[in-house]
Amino acid sequence: MKNRLTIAMQKSGRLSEETQNLLKRCGLKLNVTDRRLLAHVANMPVDIMRVRSSDIPGLVMDGVCDLGIVGDNTLEEAALERELLGGNASYAKTTTLNFGGCRLSIAMPEEFQYKGIESLHGLRFATTYPQLLNRFAAENNIKVDFCMLKGSVEVAPRVGLADGICDLVSTGATLEANGLKEVEVIFRSKASLIQSTNTINEEKQKILDTLLPRIQGVMKAKESKYIMLHAPKNKLNEVSRLMPGKETPTVLPLAGREDLVAVHVVATETFFWETMENLKALGCNSILVMPIEKMMG
Ligand code: PRT
């Protein structure tokens, strides 16, 4: 594997499909349908190591893998744990990816009288993230106890294992189904691309220099939209001001129309229905918002 770049990704779970899609959109031909831990990319000198999420930070920090895609929650917890144990916790965060969004929150039974962070002092929490919980407690001058659970954390208060929980939340439906209410968000997370701080050889660096701009290009394209519309010539300034992002619009003549022009722009920010309605109110029509597959430059 000396001259092949190794990327660690979650084998199966919430991040695995999005990670595979990202790599495929970067042009990597990967076949991860079998049970193999190591999958070879057919068209690039890249290997994909498919492991549990919690193993990814360590594999990158120890330089076993050159890159890893993992949730910030898992990464931060692992880094804090390594720092505590005096291990190597260094890595470089290359890009925050736009998937895997969630928050690590403290949740208490519905009937709990929450009167601010101090009302959590002395309580016991079920969690998979003791380091992040401890850091939050220390930053807020409270002391808390914890019991480590790697699954079904939400049931802990009901069975008398803990007073509350500290767990990941995305929609909040699981909390609600278990009679819990979110009282404090202690960490916000997304998936990230991380890189080992170990020196790599020239061959691997070349692969990295090709791959990283592609990953950034895919991410940028995912967030961007290509907008086309017809606008009244005398309203061009107002139309330009309504366009999201900082790109300068392209203005093109329309055959046989002196009063209208075609406006094309890449919007790097969310293009809201309200903006479309405001454009229409200015006299624009044929407003099209299209996804972009790849972007570079
Ligand atoms: O199995 P493995 O060891 O690989 O790791 P894992 O157990 O962390 O896997 P997985 O697939 O559950 O989660 C992988 C990563 O997805 C997490 O580390 C987060 O970065 C991210 N993520 C995003 C989430 C959630 N959203 C999420 N909602 N991870 C877990 N949840 C769980 C949460 O623990 C709770 O049980 O979903 C439930 C709450 O969801 P809502 O929508 O009801 O609020």
Image (tube, rainbow, N blue to C red):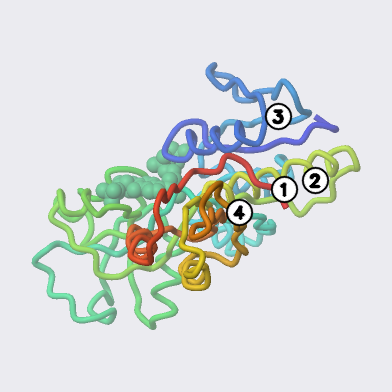
Judged by depth in the image, the label closer to the viewer, 1 or 3, is 1
Residue 160 shows in this picture = no
Residue at the spot of label 2: 209
Give the label on residue 47, or none: 3
Left or right for 159, reference 200: left
Dot 2 or dot 3: first in sequence order is: 3
Judged by depth in the image, the label closer to the viewer, 4 or 3, is 4
Quadrant position of the N terminus in the picture: top right
User: Separation of disc 4 and disc 3 at Cα?
Assistant: 46 Å
User: Separation of disc 1 and disc 3 at Cα?
Assistant: 18 Å
Up the image or down, 181 lies above or below 23; here it is: below
Give the label on residue 114, or none: none
User: Separation of disc 1 and disc 4 at Cα?
Assistant: 31 Å
Up the image or down, 236 lies above or below 174; here it is: below
Dot 4 or dot 3: first in sequence order is: 3
Dividing the image into four equal quarters, which quarter contains ligand 1?
A: top left
Dot 2 or dot 4: first in sequence order is: 2
In this rendered view, identify the residue nearer to me: 221 or 104. 221
Instruction: Give coordinates of residue 123: x percent, y percent.
Output: 25, 69
Residue 54 shows in this picture = yes
- Determine whether label 1 and label 2 are within 8 Å by CB: yes
Three-letter code for the amino acid on which mark 3 is drawn: Asp
Indicate the secondary structure of the residue bearing disc 4: strand
Q: Residue furthest left?
A: 111
Residue at the spot of label 1: 213
Instruction: Give coordinates of residue 224: x percent, y percent.
Output: 53, 52
Judged by depth in the image, the label closer to the viewer, 1 or 2, is 1
Dot 1 or dot 3: first in sequence order is: 3
Q: Residue at x 43, y 58 (%)?
A: 271
Residue at the spot of label 4: 252
Which quadrant of the structure image shows residue 50? top right
